[in-house]
Image: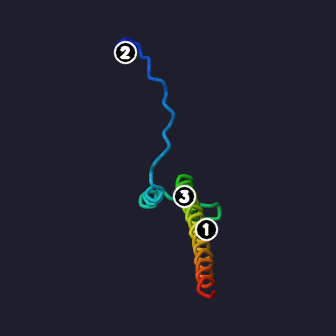
Amino acid sequence: MSYLNRMYGASRPAQPAANSNKNPNRVAGGLRGQGSDHYTLLGEDGTEREIPSRKYVQALEEKLRLQDVRISVLEKKLRSVTQDQQAITVNQRNLSNSINRRFDT
């Protein structure tokens, strides 16, 4: 059956495009290294303007998005540690008060 499929040009079903796992730092750095991070346009008045390429901007946006995710995770961890620290402080205070009451009587 597969021989017939190859013989008559039947192709495999199209697979969905995989999510790119490229490191945005390398993508952005590679674009800069190749000099394709911007376009230079010459205006009618003779001035040159540099406009960032779409791919470069997308790489920077992806980099920012990942940084935002990392920051939010770190903020959640910091809140958790702060709450744990406050709970430990309260428990230590209560324990020391209860020990002092026992020895005071």
Of the residues shown, which amino acid type is indicated by label 1?
Arg
Residue 60 x/y as whole percent: 54, 59
Can you name the residue that lies furthest to the left here?
A: 3
Instruction: Please say if 7 is above or below 57.
Output: above
Q: Secondary structure at mark 1?
A: helix
CB under 8 Å between callouts 2 and 3? no
Residue 59 vs residue 52, the one in the foreground: 59
Mark number, residue 8: none
Of the residues shown, which amino acid type is indicated by label 3?
Leu
CB under 8 Å between callouts 3 and 1? no
Mark number, residue 66: 3
Residue 64 vs residue 91, the one in the foreground: 91
For the residues carrying marks 3 and 1, which lies nearer the camera in this image?
A: 1
**Which residue sits at x=44%, y=60%?**
29
How packed mark 3 is, by other alpha carbons closer than 10 Å (few <14, some 14-19, many 20 or more), is few
How packed mark 2 is, by other alpha carbons closer than 10 Å (few <14, some 14-19, many 20 or more), is few
**Which residue sits at x=38%, y=11%?**
1
Mark number, residue 2: 2
Q: Secondary structure at mark 2?
A: helix
For the residues carrying marks 2 and 3, which lies nearer the camera in this image?
A: 3
Q: Which numbered disc flags the more N-terminal residue, 3 or 1?
A: 3
The quadrant of the picture occupied by the C terminus is bottom right
Residue 63 vs residue 90, the one in the foreground: 90
CA gap, disc 3 to disc 1?
20 Å
How packed mark 1 is, by other alpha carbons closer than 10 Å (few <14, some 14-19, many 20 or more), is few
Q: Can residue 39 be spotted in the picture?
A: no
Q: Secondary structure at mark 3?
A: helix
The quadrant holding residue 65 is bottom right
CA gap, disc 2 to disc 3?
44 Å
